[in-house]
Amino acid sequence: MKDVTSKYPPKSAFLPTSKDEIEALGWDQPDVILFSGDAYVDHPSFGAAVIGRTLQSLGLKVAIVPQPNWRDDLRDFKKLGKPRLFFGVSAGAMDSMVNHYTANRRLRHDDAYTPGGKHGMRPDYPTIVYSKILKELYPDTPVIAGGIEASLRRVSHYDYWQDRLRPSILVDAPADLIVYGMGEKPLAEIVRRLNAGEKIKDMEDIPQTVLFSKSKPQEGDIVLNSFEKCLKDKKLQALNFRHVEEESNKFYGKTLWQQTGDKMIRINPMYPPLLSEEVDASFDLPYTRLPHPRYKGKTIPAYDMIRHSVCMHRGCFGGCAFCTISAHQGKFIASRSKESIMREVKKVTEMPDFKGYISDLGGPSANMYAMGGKNKEICKKCTRPSCLHPKPCRNLNNDHSKLLDVYHSVDSLPAIKKSFIGSGVRYDLAMADSGDDKINSCNKKYMRELITDHVSGRLKVAPEHTSDRVLDCMRKPSFSLFHRFKKIFDKVNEEKGLRQQLIPYFISSHPACEEEDMAELAAETKKLNFHLEQVQDFTPTPMTLATEIYYTGFHPYTGERLYTARSEKEKLAQREFFFWYKPENRHSIMTELRKMGRKDLIAALYDNPPRNHGLLPQTAKDTGHRMSSKKYTENKHFKERNKKR
């Protein structure tokens, strides 16, 4: 990667990170000091920069201490003194335990949010560690916790890495307040009240905040099962989750309460989704879009991935069972204006290392830009966690015309050679029948332009599994839709003379997934000529439907008991089927298939097909033999297995 630090703006263009930088600005004391588990990258994709610049726009003097050393004499926590208003604490852009450990609870050896990718620059649970240190050093100065780690641990939650139910992070982190979700609006209100002389302990009604409350639940509030009751009865924890998810996905949610020990935790509802001008205001702040000069000569992997990308919206209405986006950003899409997007694209083109390629025009789901309900009043009453599952909502406007307009405007700029879509695309959203021929035609055009003009050789999509039963638990569409999309992809490539690849993502060990489901996935993906590489084991993370099923054993909405692979042996057995083609896996896979009584799958994966076994002959494109879909579903083992269910 080319070193562009020789053309850096001066340090004064960044938020200060040291005593010398503060003195150079002529400050006597910062108003707010932020402590972050990430390196300081002054870019709208990094939470600490967004919060720092937001507070700065409110007229505050803001300093950042990135990745403070918590092991030594704590000089990093002392070097800037105490702020006038409060300390802000964040673990960083990821939950620290996801950042540190694999799905098998093995320590990772790198950290994408640290210079050089170096591991070990933040502790486990930085929100707790940083808050404790600051409260010990400055007991009278308020501490406000935020970011993804605090946000998704705001109520009792299952911690996969400790394999236990933990209380709200507020119990362990001695913060005065938690700001959950996207923090611009709640922090603006907190600052307004602090400047007016109000104490944080008296701020009980600010949306998107969590605190120990001295008041009592009011009529219409929801009182969750206490932490202690949830410890004794997992079904009560599952019921709690349903309330939390439903209220998080509402336009106007209710206040939640949870007794923990002798204290009552109050979780105020989210703000309604931001208006376009409010999202613009955040993205239009004076970011340098660069890492702080203190990292000169070092690379920060997470920054290198997004340096030439542009995020166009927040929120996701997909509601996937394993995803935390809606719990943090909300279900409703908050989109930037086209003008704001174009301003950022032009800034990217002015970067000294820009070569003409936008790496991503995207968002949490790339093609949800400017989408929402046709009738907003219906949306305001809706409690559905997903607008796409089990079927696309009839009130959903899935018109891709505004998205295409942005693509065309970006690509028309002289400095742009090509813009790519690197974020995940919901092909089910683009393929859903809108009931309007004009919109359907536009959406077909979107898919065609996506494939021909915005793919960097490989288009990544996420069918996640092949079993409809598992996909239903995931809140994902049937795999038959992926087949339809692949036909479109292949046809467009053939017509345009392109040699692009479709790269599907898959997950093993997800709740409801059994080893036999993975065996069928192997056969199905082999039939499609895929040698899988974008795969992962399911990792339970706080505040997802799948995690609650994993921990409790029950589906929070249906009460149905569901199987989930839990042991390392069970997980490995499922994951092995992703790589059925590796010689070292062949013996163990064949042994397991014999135990299942699935000789048909052995034949599908390895053997020459015997006669009258319903197998198709090998084609030039296949790496092995295939079973016809009709015969496959008529197979006696398939029928017997589904009768049991």
Image (cartoon, rainbow, N blue to C red):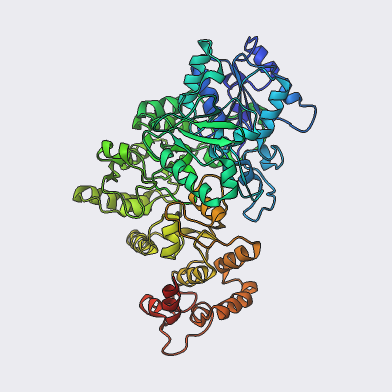
Nearer-the-camera pick, 276 or 496 = 276
Question: Quadrant of residue 148 in the image?
Answer: top right
| Quadrant where the image shows the N terminus | top right
> Does residue 149 appear left or right of residue 401 in this picture?
right
| Quadrant where the image shows the C terminus | bottom left
Q: Residue 441, position in %: x, y?
A: 23, 51
Residue 643 visible at all: yes
> Does residue 260 appear left or right of residue 388 in this picture?
right
> Does residue 399 appear left or right of residue 467 in this picture?
left
Q: Residue furthest right?
A: 73
**Residue at the location (31% across, 49% down)?**
446
Nearer-the-camera pick, 376 or 45 = 376
Q: Residue furthest bottom?
A: 611
Q: Please determine whether, in this image, residue 91 is positioned above or below residue 389.
A: above
Question: Quadrant of residue 61 in the image?
Answer: top right
Q: How many marks?
A: 0
Q: Residue 524, position in %: x, y?
A: 45, 70
**Residue at the location (54% across, 69% down)?**
515
